[in-house]
Image: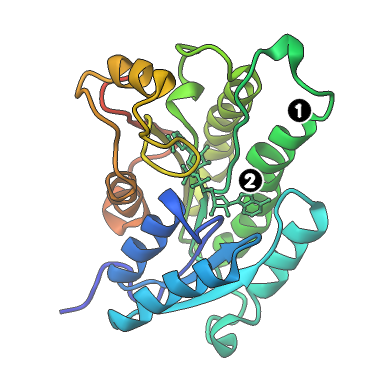
Amino acid sequence: MSKPLENKLALVTGSSRGIGAAIAIRLAAEGADVIVNYAASPNRAKAVVSQITNAGGHAEAVAADLSTIEGTKALVASIDKVFGGKFGGRLDILVNNAGMVKFGPFLESPDDFYDKHFNLNVRSLITLSKDAAKRMIKTGWGRIINIGSCHGEAAAFPGVTMYVATKFAVRGFTRALSRELGPTGVTVNNVQPGAVDTELSPDDNGPAAQAMKKLMSVGRYGRPEEIASAVSFLASPDSAFINGESLTVDGGWNA
Ligand code: NAD
């Protein structure tokens, strides 16, 4: 039986671990060929690629530090070369997942706080979406899926002011771009996870983790696979009538 994403090329940024790794593995299981982007951990990216290939899927790891313009350009250039040029420069699915957060009071934050958060969480996503959309429009089909956050819906948790600003930007960008691309067959959506147990936000039962669990009505952290399943649906042909949406997958955080 054919799989829903067969013969589709997907790029998942920051997919050597955490939510990105789960998304890459899930999209490959649905039949997509997947570019596993990573910044600094080749062994972990290779492990994700091995997991995919051992399960019969196709994946290639591509290094690119998306906090820099050069890194973003290098990743775009790789699209033309992966899988021996099989896709001829086409890109069907872009998942803008790479992101970072630093906790702490805004008034005590270092001067480079703005650049660090925005360059990765917003600028790389905007730059990649522009290039991806141009490629997708040529085939009349595409899916751009941004990984925002429950912090992009409301500022319910203190100490992440700059992160909140970036994730609100992701939501606004998603909506605006969806209007421009709607007629082309390319959809743009935003998945907003609640607290998910990853290295970015470990469920270590410390005071922050306990406070976050209280905000989520399900009373627990999410698993990366639970975010991947929402992304997989938005990447599929079944989601064609969903555009500009921010889908909260947050255990009730923003209910
Ligand atoms: P993580 O820290 O476990 O993984 C982040 C990924 O981004 C890693 O693969 C890392 O290598 C990559 N990355 C970091 N800097 C990079 C760079 N300069 N260039 C390229 N890649 C880079 O985090 P995660 O929890 O898996 O988060 C993934 C996304 O989900 C982020 O956008 C994050 O904001 C969002 N998110 C996470 C949570 C959560 O609770 N974990 C909640 C809401 C939203």
214 or 154: nearer the eye?
214
Q: How many labels does the image show?
A: 2
Image spot of residue 200 (x, y percent) = 50, 39
Give the residue at mark 1.
Answer: 113
Image spot of residue 38 (x, y percent) = 60, 62
Say few, some or many: other residues with alpha carbon within 10 Å of mark 2 (under 14 / 14 to 19 / 20 or more): many
Q: Quadrant of residue 162?
A: top right
- Mark 2: secondary structure: helix
Does label 1 or label 2 sit earlier along the sequence?
1
254 displayed left or right of 199: left
160 displayed left or right of 116: left
Image spot of residue 49 (x, y percent) = 44, 75
Which quadrant holds the C terminus? top left
Which quadrant holds the N terminus? bottom left
62 displayed left or right of 6: right
Q: Which mark is residue 125?
A: 2
230 or 180: nearer the eye?
230
Q: Nearer the viewer, mark 1 or mark 2?
A: 1
Q: What residue type is labelled 2?
A: Leu
238 displayed left or right of 96: left
Q: Which amino acid does label 1 sit on?
A: Phe
| Colouring | rainbow
Q: Are marks 1 and 2 in contact (CB under 8 Å)?
A: no
* Residue ID at (31%, 58%): 237
* Residue ID at (46%, 61%): 141
Q: Which mark is residue 82?
A: none
**Label 1, label 2: how many angstroms apart (C-alpha)?**
18 Å
**Extreme-bottom residue of the structure:** 84
